[in-house]
Amino acid sequence: MSTEEPVDPETPAVTPKSVIVHPIVVFGILDHYIRRQEGQERVIGTLLGHLDEETGVVEVSNAYAVPHTESGGEVAVGQAFNKSMFGLLSRVNSEERVVGWYATGGGGAVQDDGTALIHDFYSRECAAPVHVVVDASLRDGKGVETAAYHRGPPGADGAAAAFAPVPSSLTFSDGEKVCIDRMIRGQGDEPFATAESLAELPSDADDVRDDFQGLLGQIDEILAYAKKCKSGEVTPDPAVARCIGEALAALPKIEPGVLDGSKNVDAQDIVMVSYLASITKAQLAIAAKIHESF
Amino acid sequence: MAWLSGANSSIASIKARHRVSEVHIDGLALLKLVKHCRDALPKMVAGSLLGLDQGSILEVTHCFPFPTPKSREEYGDGVELGDGVDDLDGEEYQMEMMKMLREVNVDNNCVGWYKSIYVGSFCQTPLVETQFSYQENLSDNCVVLLYDPVESSRGVLNLKAYQLSEQFITSYRAKSNSFVAPSAILVELPLRVRNPGLITAFLYDLHASGQLRKEPSSEPNADAAPLERYLEHCCQWVDDLVEEQGKFQYYLRNVERHRDQLRWHNKRKAEGDQEDADAPTWKNTTQPPRLDSLLIAIRSINIVRRSVRILPALSRSCT
């Protein structure tokens, strides 16, 4: 792979100031790592998302695997693969652009020539690529850690700058939150008892119950905190107090009579819906009988 | 669906001997599916599922989206993946995508498809047709996953796995118009989510770090709205059903009239009247298709079930 100048040197490169990664990306990277070729040490792939030019925040919302080989100082990246995969994916979602690349590794960016060469390649794909490293080794009792790096412009003498860490964090879209929540809660009373983490998809009724339990738990927590503050065990935190105050103020003051009235309306709604439901069921049962009989 | 049989003839020849009874979807595939369906809102989209059937379990390990056909503005209920001009595009797309995914060691076996739906309105003839061609040409074990992205904005993951029942397949293949109980057309399979060990580790980290704690939703609770929508749909479908029933009644009346005529004709013949020798011809020979009304029945029953099920949610918003 030869090093060339970036295709579009005219655009002033915005320096990425922070990177936010969606869990789907980490899932994809780990899955790719599991499916790596035998003997392959790390896997790489392209990150998709968008770069907010004003704030310098890179949001990574998708990723795909790219085949590559490394031996000694030689690196071969599936450039054609990368190009056509991006073409295919952008037909589905044209909002997402190449924002960088990922690799798996054990803590910290691998500062070898290979990394630099791949980064050079991605510098031609987008103006300021970020490099996200996911530690999939789970060594030394560490979890799956994500780190992001950025490489500044080459110095005056033409030497490539070193990779500088960029603060990174995870962010969840609504859909991801719901899914991941299900993956954890669906495992039943003993989460993470098995390596497969097989999870049921709970029904709506379970959801309501769980929500209430969660809410009650939070209220208990706040109550315990308030009691501790009162007894002087904990120094009260004004910020927390303000949050509690806001939460209490958010409750509308409802007169008992109004509350009863709205409860009655609610009950009537429920009766009406179940009535409609049974009428419809009766209709359908009759229809099925008619069909069956001729 | 020529491409299915052509491209996967090797798979088609290995017809599954027995059916799967459960579907396991990988967390990654689930996230991809949900992302695609939600990103594409308000358009309704579809995609392909990759994986393997092992014993009684169908494992879905990967999925990829189908591109939205350019020529069709509305990619709504009438989504037809099997025919039409714009499908040529989609077919090439799928082949290409599967080829590329094989290079990075993703399971290269199509086990079904997914589709985003809107308020239970999924049960349409095109869906049945597409699913039929999947189960007929690829494997008996192909499933369709239906996901409702609109409902998920309420924090509900409404994802269901369906297959066509063998009884229905046999009847549909024979193009017979016989009666199949509405509940026996589509079979729902239990769906579970599984994750490989490494991703479980990541999940555990997430769980332990407490990043997932439910934040109180900032938007006002609009739980009553879906119920209204459900009831509206329900009313509409009951109307549709009545209309379909009307067709059958009309048909039945015709049958009766024809029998009367025939009887009268035979009587006159027996009396030796040779004036009108020709037997009255039977005009309305085709039975109206049953499929539509059966599907409406499923749709309505589903909506009823759902609206009953969201009642607790409704009472939650009011208390």
Image: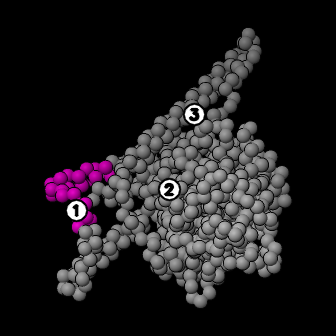
* Image vertical order of residue B170 relative to residue B62, above or below: above
Task: Estimate the x, y position of residue B272 in percent, counting from the top left.
Answer: 73, 14
The mark found on residue B248 in the picture is 3
At mark 2, the secondary structure is loop
The reply to whether the magenta stretch includes residue B18 is: no
Pointer 2 indicates a residue of which chain?
A
Q: Mark 1 belongs to which amino acid?
A: Ala
Q: CA distance from mark 2 to mark 3?
A: 65 Å
Pointer 3 indicates a residue of which chain?
B
* Image vertical order of residue A54 relative to residue B197, above or below: above
Q: Are marks 3 and 1 on the same chain?
A: no
Residue found 46% across the figure and 78% down from its top: B209
Residue found 49% across the figure and 48% down from its top: B119
Quadrant for the C terminus of chain A, please. top right
Q: Mark 3 belongs to which amino acid?
A: Phe
At mark 3, the secondary structure is helix
